[in-house]
Image (cartoon, helix red, strand yellow):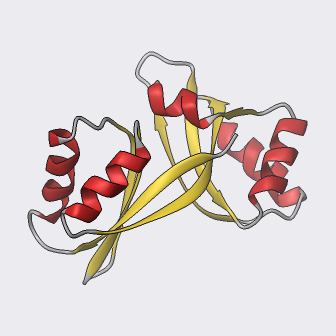
């Protein structure tokens, strides 16, 4: 039920992000979801990719600093209050959300939320116990 995410630390300068996407494209690695956070000096690119082991090696070979993190993907109805239902459930169980990002597929009825929790196993147990759909990594990687 856990998903492997890779994080790439980038200098905050023109072309750096394109170097990452170029390396992944050349290696035929598909991006499934991503988030980019920045400061004035650097950024952190968080990605779910079709082949995280290969992506990590390709990017390391290109000189990037790459980390790996376990996250959780949760499917939620794409309607007002969908995110709030999940967050309230987690709050009631004292599970902290460290960060999150989301995507919606055009024409779909659900959104996919990617979470990093302080207590991942407890979060999965709470969410599945309340009937939320936690998406396994292999389904997310391969669409």
- In the rendering, at what x and y percent does residue 16 appear? 15, 65
Left or right relative to 102: residue 129: right
Q: Is 48 located above or below residue 93 in the figure?
A: above
- Which of 88 and 65 lies nearest the eye of the viewer? 65
**Residue at the outermost left position:** 14
Q: Is 102 located above or below residue 38 in the figure?
A: above
- In the rendering, at what x and y percent does residue 127 appear? 81, 42
Q: Is 61 located above or below residue 121 in the figure?
A: below
Left or right relative to 34: residue 26: left
Residue at 18% x, 40% y: name it.
25
- In the rendering, at what x and y percent does residue 101 appear? 50, 51
**Residue at the outermost bottom position:** 41
Residue at 44% x, 25% y: name it.
105
Decide if residue 48 is in sight here.
no
Rendering quarter of residue 70: bottom right
- Which of 88 and 51 lies nearest the eye of the viewer? 51
- In the rendering, at what x and y percent does residue 137 appear? 58, 37
Decide if residue 75 is in sight here.
yes
Left or right relative to 24: residue 80: right
Rendering quarter of residue 44: bottom left
Rendering quarter of residue 46: bottom left
Residue at 35% x, 47% y: name it.
54
Q: Is 70 located above or below residue 72 in the figure?
A: below
- In this figure, what is the number of numbered marks? 0
The quarter in which the N terminus is drawn is top right
Residue at 75% x, 45% y: name it.
86
């Amino acid at each position: 039920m856990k998903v492997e995410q890779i994080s790439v630390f980038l200098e905050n300068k023109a072309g750096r992000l394109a170097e990452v996407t170029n390396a992944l494209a050349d290696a035929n690695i598909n991006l499934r979801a991503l988030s980019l956070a920045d400061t004035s000096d650097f950024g952190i690119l968080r990605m779910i990719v079709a082949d995280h082991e290969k992506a990590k090696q390709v990017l390391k070979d290109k000189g990037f600093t790459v980390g790996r993190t376990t996250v959780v993907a949760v499917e939620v109805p794409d309607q007002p209050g969908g995110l709030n239902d999940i967050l309230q459930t987690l709050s009631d169980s004292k599970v902290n959300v460290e960060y999150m990002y989301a995507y919606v597929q055009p024409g779909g009825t659900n959104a996919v939320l990617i979470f990093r929790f302080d207590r991942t196993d407890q979060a999965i147990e709470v969410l599945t116990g309340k009937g939320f759909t936690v998406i396994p990594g292999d389904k997310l990687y391969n669409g």
